[in-house]
Image (cartoon, rainbow, N blue to C red):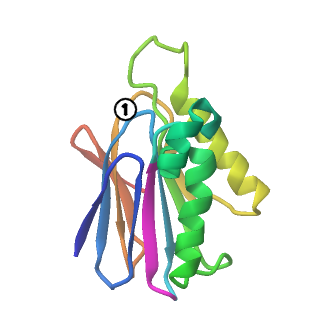
């Protein structure tokens, strides 16, 4: 089955061969996690680093923000049977797609919050392709754990 993750959403697959994709990772971050033994994997697509930017929006949709979305994402993965010591984490996005606009640097701030949360929780990022100025579409195949992204007609493994 193929699942598409929208902005400020997460999705999990639990069947071999399920494919999860998220489009339009500009300054947004896509985080994919996969536990091959449990055959559980998912992608989170968050837009902003800190929920303190808009407490009301954070209450309505915690997945919009890295600091609230990432913990929710991992809780759901564990609920579905994933184990912390078996998961593989990949990350893509965090670009500055508006050339020359470094005023807010949302992409870099999104990268930093993910790395901070992973470090704080003793989790390692196995592969990433972040920063720069290119948009990305991220894919995860359940079972194999194959993770990759496409950008401007090119494909790269994670």
Residue 35 falls left or right of residue 141: right
Magenta residues: mostly which secondary structure? strand
Quarter of the picture containing the N terminus is bottom left
**Residue 43 percent across, percent down from the top left:** 43, 61
Task: Name above or below for residue 87 compared with residue 44.
Answer: below
* Front-lying residue, 124 or 72: 72
Please name the residue shown 21% across and 42% down the image: 153
Residue lying furthest bottom: 37
Task: Name above or below for residue 154 compared with residue 86.
Answer: above
Please name the residue shown 53% across and 28% down the image: 106
Quadrant in which residue 13 is drawn: bottom left
**Residue 59 percent across, percent down from the top left:** 54, 47
Quarter of the picture containing the C terminus is bottom left
Task: Name above or below for residue 141 compared with residue 125.
Answer: below
The residues colored magenta run 38-45
* Front-lying residue, 85 or 148: 85
Answer few, some or many: residues within 10 Å of disc 1's Cα (few below 14, many 20 plus, some between 14 and 19).
some
Residue corresponding to mark 1: 134
Residue 49 visible in the snapshot: no
């Amino acid at each position: 089955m193929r699942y598409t993750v929208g902005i400020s959403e997460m999705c999990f697959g639990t069947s071999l061969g399920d494919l999860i994709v998220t489009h339009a990772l500009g300054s947004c971050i896509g985080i994919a996690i996969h536990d091959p033994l449990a055959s559980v994997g998912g992608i989170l697509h968050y837009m902003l680093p800190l929920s303190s930017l808009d407490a009301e929006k954070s209450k309505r949709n915690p997945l919009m923000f890295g600091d609230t979305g990432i913990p929710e994402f991992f809780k759901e993965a564990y609920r579905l049977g994933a184990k912390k010591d078996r998961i593989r984490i990949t990350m893509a996005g965090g670009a500055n797609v508006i050339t020359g606009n470094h005023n807010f640097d949302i992409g870099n701030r999104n990268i930093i919050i993910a790395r901070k949360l992973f470090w704080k929780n003793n989790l390692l990022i196995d592969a990433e392709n972040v920063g720069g100025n290119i948009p990305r579409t991220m894919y995860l195949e359940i079972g194999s754990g194959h993770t990759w992204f496409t950008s401007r007609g090119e494909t790269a493994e994670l």
